[in-house]
Amino acid sequence: MYADVITLFPEMVDFPLSQSITGRARKEKYLKLSFVNPRDFTEDRHRTVDDRPYGGGTGMLMKAEPVFRALEKVRKKTSYVILLTPKGQTFNQETALKLAKKKRLVFICGHYEGIDERITPLADMQLSIGDYVLTGGEPAAVVVIDAVTRLIPGVLKKEDATVNETFTDGLMEAPQYTRPAVWRGQSVPDALLSGNHKKIEEWRRNMSEELTSKAAKVSAEKKADREPEKKKKTVLKHRRKAV
Ligand code: SAM
């Protein structure tokens, strides 16, 4: 897979993805990562990539033209363009699986207060890695490329390594243990030591279901807790509009 990253700070993406499994995937050419810097597509003496937002407001925005020209430089017919933004759809394993099937991905990393809105329609997908705001899209690009790379066939040496993982089949993975069988008074569950494959599978399935339903309950409770706050905010917003 090819991944082109449009970024003002290529090292923020290059270094983390040079380590461990993604680093090996790059060496073995499963992942061909390249970088393009919008600053190289400026024409003024100061190589300006940002400017003040129209209508006022804090911070600076990345200008559209250098980002557009960087995109034009790398975009091919088969490219799938992803704009990293906290406003995008939340990244998950399903999206990672979908992206792992693409031949060529392009990631646009914003910085400062983001990018001129007129870049948005050029993207095939707007992606967020979670409900929080980062200083730039670079850590988000690392997260997405890491999750996608390990799904490329051949990257993980054991073919089925991603099959029973958390999220792959909608269930969380069962707890895992390695030697010693007793560690600081805590024993590995008997089923895993039994050598009986049927029993092991059954135990794993039960644990997966139990963990998944516990997690679903916690997240439903959190959502319910947030509801009154959300209602209060909406009321405030309407009141502000009415004033
Ligand atoms: N002013 C923007 C807003 O409120 O939506 C936030 C801009 S943020 C400081 C700068 C850049 O970081 C964004 O353009 C985006 O590329 C990236 N970014 C920040 N949070 C992100 C997230 N949760 N997921 C993906 N990218 C994010």
Image: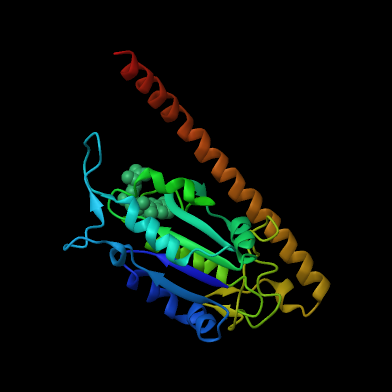
Q: Residue 9 location in percent, x, y?
A: 31, 67
From the image, which quarter does the C terminus lie in?
top left
Identify the residue at horizontal 38%, vertical 63% (top origin): 138
Position in image of residue 228 (x %, y %) = 45, 27
Can you name the residue that lies furthest to the left here? Answer: 45
Which residue extends farthest top? 242
Of residues 89 and 120, the one nearer the viewer is 120
Residue 200 visible in the current orientation: yes
Viewer-proximal residue, 42 or 134? Answer: 42
User: For the point 51% across and 84% down, which residue is it?
Assistant: 24
Seen from this angle, which residue lies furthest right? 198
Tell whether 89 sits left or right of 13.
right
Q: Determine the image quadrant of residue 42.
A: bottom left
Q: Position of residue 44 (x, y in %)?
A: 20, 60
Q: Give the residue furthest to the bottom.
A: 28
Q: Is residue 158 above or below residue 52?
A: below
Q: Is residue 185 left or right of residue 232?
A: right
Q: How many marks?
A: 0
